[in-house]
Image: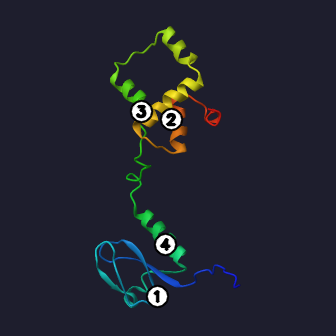
């Protein structure tokens, strides 16, 4: 039986910026034209060959396009993920009037809750919010409830 092996893609690709919208794209150097995916302008490869950068392999071409496109981005507009986990605890805290000092008895009650009780409360809340949820969500919620992540497999 013939043994299958992966070969490195050594096809030359041209990475260039669109003349109209400045969006970076790549094209094989043997192609005649490339249409911009953003604005629809058609570029003749022979005309833009001197303006672009030649890289070898599709992976290298994609990585180069990503790198060049990220260089154009304004750092102030870059942000982390917009995904935010909200729980009933944080909502309740936001709607309650701000009290600077908690009563000592309330503080002790919170500390006396075992990890198991907190874990059950957390699971109930997660199942009410999402139904099904991944393990990383459990870890995030465990931090919110004050449960060490090392205790999660035991619970």
Residue 123, percent from left and from top: 50, 33
Task: Work out whether mark 4 precedes mark 3 in sequence or the reverse, and give the earlier one.
Answer: 4
Residue at label 1? Answer: 29
Q: Residues within 10 Å of mark 1 (few under 14, many from 20)?
A: some
Q: State the SS at label 1.
A: loop
Q: Are marks 2 and 4 in contact (CB under 8 Å)?
A: no
Q: State the SS at label 4.
A: helix
Q: Is residue 10 above or below residue 92?
A: below
Report the Cα–Cα distance between label 4 and label 3. Answer: 39 Å
Report the Cα–Cα distance between label 2 and label 3. Answer: 8 Å
Report the Cα–Cα distance between label 4 and label 1. Answer: 15 Å
Q: Are marks 2 and 3 in contact (CB under 8 Å)?
A: yes
Image mark for residue 141: 2
Q: Nearer the viewer, residue 35 or 150?
A: 150
Between label 4 and label 3, give the one nearer the viewer: 3
Q: Is residue 151 above or below residue 62?
A: above
Task: Work out whether mark 4 precedes mark 1 in sequence or the reverse, and give the earlier one.
Answer: 1
Q: Residue at x 46, y 31 (%)?
A: 124
Q: Residues within 10 Å of mark 3 (few under 14, many from 20)?
A: some
Image mark for residue 56: none
Task: Work out whether mark 2 precedes mark 1 in sequence or the reverse, and give the earlier one.
Answer: 1
Task: Work out whether mark 3 precedes mark 1 in sequence or the reverse, and give the earlier one.
Answer: 1
Report the Cα–Cα distance between label 3 and label 1. Answer: 53 Å
Residue at label 4? Answer: 62
Q: Are marks 3 and 1 in contact (CB under 8 Å)?
A: no
Report the Cα–Cα distance between label 2 and label 4. Answer: 36 Å
Task: Work out whether mark 2 precedes mark 4 in sequence or the reverse, and give the earlier one.
Answer: 4
Q: State the SS at label 3.
A: loop
Q: Are marks 4 and 3 in contact (CB under 8 Å)?
A: no
Image mark for residue 87: 3
Q: Are marks 4 and 1 in contact (CB under 8 Å)?
A: no
Task: Work out whether mark 2 precedes mark 3 in sequence or the reverse, and give the earlier one.
Answer: 3
């Amino acid at each position: 039986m013939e043994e299958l092996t992966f070969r490195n893609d050594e096809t030359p690709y041209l990475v260039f910026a669109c003349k109209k919208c400045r969006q970076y794209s790549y094209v094989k150097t043997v192609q005649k034209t490339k249409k911009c995916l953003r604005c629809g302008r058609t570029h003749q490869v022979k005309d833009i060959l001197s303006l672009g950068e030649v890289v070898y392999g599709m992976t290298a071409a994609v990585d180069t396009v990503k790198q060049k496109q990220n260089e154009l981005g304004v750092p102030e507009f870059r942000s982390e993920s917009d995904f935010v986990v909200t729980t009933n605890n944080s909502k309740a805290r936001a709607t309650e009037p701000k009290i600077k000092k908690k009563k000592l008895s309330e503080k002790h009650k919170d500390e006396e809750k075992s990890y198991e009780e907190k874990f059950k409360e957390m699971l109930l809340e997660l199942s009410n919010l999402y139904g099904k949820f991944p393990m990383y969500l459990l870890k995030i919620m465990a931090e919110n409830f004050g449960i060490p992540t090392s205790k999660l497999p035991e619970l």
